[in-house]
Image (cartoon, rainbow, N blue to C red):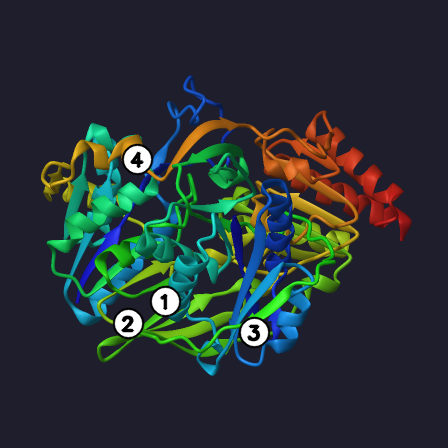
Amino acid sequence: MELLVLVEHRRGEIREVTFEMLTKGREIAQKTNSRLNTIILGKNIRDKAEVLARYADRVLMIDDERFEFFNSDLYQQVLSNIIREVKPILTMIGHTSYGVDLAPSLAVSLNIPLITDCLDLDIQDGQLTAVRQMYGGKIYARLNVRKSESYIATIRQGVITASEGNLKGEIIELPPPDIVEPVKKKFIEYVLPKIGEVDITSADILVAIGRGIKDQANIPLAEELAKTLGGVLACSRPIVDKGWLPPDRQVGSSGKTVKPKLYLALGISGAFQHVIGMKNSQLIIAVNKDPNAPIFNVAHYGVVEDLFKIVPILTEKIKELKKKTS
Amino acid sequence: MEIIVCVKHVPETAEVELKIDKTGRDIEKSGLVFDINEWDDYAVEEAIRIKEKLGGNVTVITVGSEDADSTLRKCLAKGADKAIRITDKRINTSDPYIIAKILSKTIKEMPFDLILTGAQSSDDGYAFIGPALAELLDIPHVTLAKKIEFKDRSVIVNRELEGGLEEVVEVELPALITIQTGINEPRYVSIMGIRKAMKKEIKTVSIDDLGLSETEVGIEGSWIHVSEVYIPSIERRAEFIRGTPEEVASKIIEIIKSRGVI
């Protein structure tokens, strides 16, 4: 059998999710006695193909300037043909901004069952099963995929630990493909994140707020605690979405990765996308009303309580302490 | 500009302790408050803003039972012009692929320039329907939009990538765009507004109307099937600090002092 992993790369770098998928791919390949293929589309990518050859049995490469930037329209046309030719039992694509743009329409056009955002997956007797999260990570689900000769799965980034490659895969350069269908979408440019006035990645103490803060009017409460502690205010995604704090305060996969000495999470449930950005903090203390909130799986200490009952007293007590010691 | 927005009526679960139901395949939903999916709320707002600027109509569509009418009414109160609910008991066990098919059959018969959906739903979070629907309708799509601007017969979209990076893409109309949270500030509607919207008609459609057979929906037609749901076992469960708020605050200070943080 054949397995296929789509390489994700951007601005000259192969993205980590690629190696995570190749690690999982190798595991499944060994178990099912399959061949692990990986495909990379891009411009001037020979050096990348050589790196990838350590991780797969075969590296398929299309080096063509039309693939300088990701375009799901173009990728879909090329990948459809590759999947028809290679006939992989499983094609893995990252559940990333690129993957979510590509996988659903690719699967529909090929009429191949797709399962998205998998944390883990397995093939037994030609049957694909997967584990996913639901309800913001509070619930896990096991799923069966309808029996098929071919499956597509998108894989959540940052879940599988990528291992080093020790294979000596063959690099096969494929000829530039014909693009038959009109391409209705084009890449124009990247927009880099704005540099803010506060750098949360260099702060020793972060007081981070989430949905539990409820109202913009309550933010000064958390801000005062942060100031009293000599720290900086950070937040999870919903706070930035509401426009209550600027994007440079956001911790998580679409924001910043932080490792402070103290991360005090107030009213943050701990969705995976947030946790991935703060789980390596030295000391994590979380306050949340829900005892099953996933934040308590990464916190060292937890308080199951309304943050509004804790924060004012905590601020007062730290003020007293500082007065005494100064 | 004729705009269609696909919306979903979902339980609010962010700050609630969830339980597994009797089937073992979903959560216990009784007692939960339902509302429009957060991503879809931004999509509806974006559609109404485009209409206010360029003129046209906004039609909201959902697949669901009568309960979902409250979400449609909310959209009508915000400024949507028409609402359609596709409803059928046989749809209940359908996966997102079937939902996308049902939506495409409905939308095929309607005039449109632009379709908006949320980038994903807060319940099962597949992030599948938008681009799948675009493929079924044979139109281009752009996912995870953070900004939309119109230029002749095309749209310039800022897409959210990882780590705060965005990319700008141009797509020809008609197109489908999935909306990321934070693109705008969704308006609130008053009780009065929702009451007024009670008078507006919600058109209901069944799968027979769409010419879909029973084997094309439900488990039979689905790609994926949930066999079991569970509350995850805890890997590094926090040590819990208990007591009155006063005691808790003192203990927190003790801990951070002992770690030399303050």
Query: Which residue is identified by label 4?
Result: B94
Query: Could you tell me which secondary element the residue under label 4 belongs to?
Result: loop
The label nearer to you, 1 versus 3, is: 1
Give the residue at x 49% y 28%: B229
* Label pair 2/1, CB-CB below 8 angstroms: yes
From the viewer's perspective, is the residue at label 2 or at label 4 nearer? 2
Q: CA distance from mark 2 to mark 1?
A: 8 Å
Which disc, if any, is residue A194? Answer: 3
Could you tell me residue B41's position as x and y percent? 33, 51
Tell me if A54 is positioned left or right of B251 in this view. left
Q: Quadrant of the N terminus of chain B?
A: bottom left
Q: Quadrant of residue A14?
A: bottom right
User: Would residue B59 be seen by someone viewing this image from the given angle?
Assistant: yes
* Amino acid at pointer 3: Lys
Locate residue B89: give its quadrant. top left
Whole-number angstrom distance, CA of label 3 to CA of label 4: 42 Å
**Residue B34 x, y percent position in the rendering:** 34, 34
Instruction: Specify whether residue A275 is in view.
Output: no
* Residue position for label 1: A77
